[in-house]
Image (tube, rainbow, N blue to C red):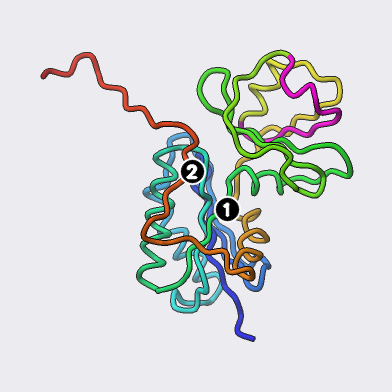
Amino acid sequence: MTNIYILNIETATKNCSVSISKDGKLIALKEICEANFSHAEKLHQFIKDTLKESNIDFKELSAIAISKGPGSYTGLRIGVSSAKGLCFALDIPLISVLTLESLAHATKVESGYIIPLLDARRQEVFTAVFNSDYTPVKETYNYILEENSFAEYDKIIFLGDGATKTKEIITHPNATFLEGYYPSAKEMIALSYEKFLQKEFEDVAYFEPFYLKDFHVTVSKKKAF
């Protein structure tokens, strides 16, 4: 059987992350987490670097996997545009992975729930709820945090860049907060490989990121008309 090489791209947050997997196993990873969102400058170089480290050529790739969101509008646009361009050029499938699902795979629990959190504006987060075997209990949604948020779950591990904000707002006796975690192309590997085996591919021409809510452009009041 021919080796299955998948290029995984994660740009939904300020972590610009690229990995190469071979038959579902990590063989190269390159990422940087910067507050100023350096995706436009770093992404293509990271792709070249991981291919070089993997000792393979673009033409040997079996598919491209992209973190579909939710997350940063600009980050998602950059990642999806790059992934679609490569798929068109190489004539290979496009795979999408939910950002919060891959983030949930950054930790493990024997019991209870994993709740990944991406920071949104003010007291809002993008979130989802998974049980101990990563089965979705509640699909991706945006949520305004309150003191009693997530009280219906008895034991929780929160992780992601929204964990710090959540820790300051809610009161939950059985909650663990894993701060400093960002979605990574490393955690995309098992998910994208399974989708490849199941032939769960996107329509490259029509695929769009999962923004979850509308993108708003703020117009300066100083602008002259």
Q: Quadrant of residue 25?
A: bottom right
Q: Secondary structure at mark 1?
A: strand
- What amino acid type should be assigned to the residue bearing mark 1? Val
* Residue annotated with mark 1: 97
Asked whether residue 68 is drawn in magenta, I would say no
**Nearer to me, 88 or 159:** 88
Expressed as whole percent of the image width and height from the top left, the position of residue 147 reads: 71, 13
Residue 78 x %, y %: 39, 49
- Determine crowd level at label 2: few under 14, some 14-19, many 20+ residues with C-alpha closer than 10 A: some
Eyeballing the image, is 154 above or below 133? Answer: above
Instruction: Identify the mark nearer the N-term, 2 or 1.
Output: 1
Q: Mark 2: which amino acid?
A: Phe
Residue 158 in magenta stretch: yes
Q: Which residue lies under the disc numbered 2?
A: 210
Position of residue 21 measured from the top left corner of the image (x, y, whole percent)? 61, 67
Identified at 41% across, 31% down, the residue is 214
x, y percent for residue 77: 39, 46
Q: Determine the residue positioned at 42% across, 49% down.
A: 208
Q: Secondary structure at mark 2?
A: loop
Residue at coordinates 49% horizontally, 78% vertically from top-left? 60
Q: Which residues are magenta?
A: 148-161
Total labels drawn: 2
Image quarter of the N terminus: bottom right
For this view, does 108 lie left or right of residue 169? Answer: right
Residue at 10% from the left image edge and 19% from the top image edge: 225
Question: Dividing the picture into quarters, in which one does residue 131 lie?
Answer: top right
Q: Specify the principal SS of the magenta part.
A: loop
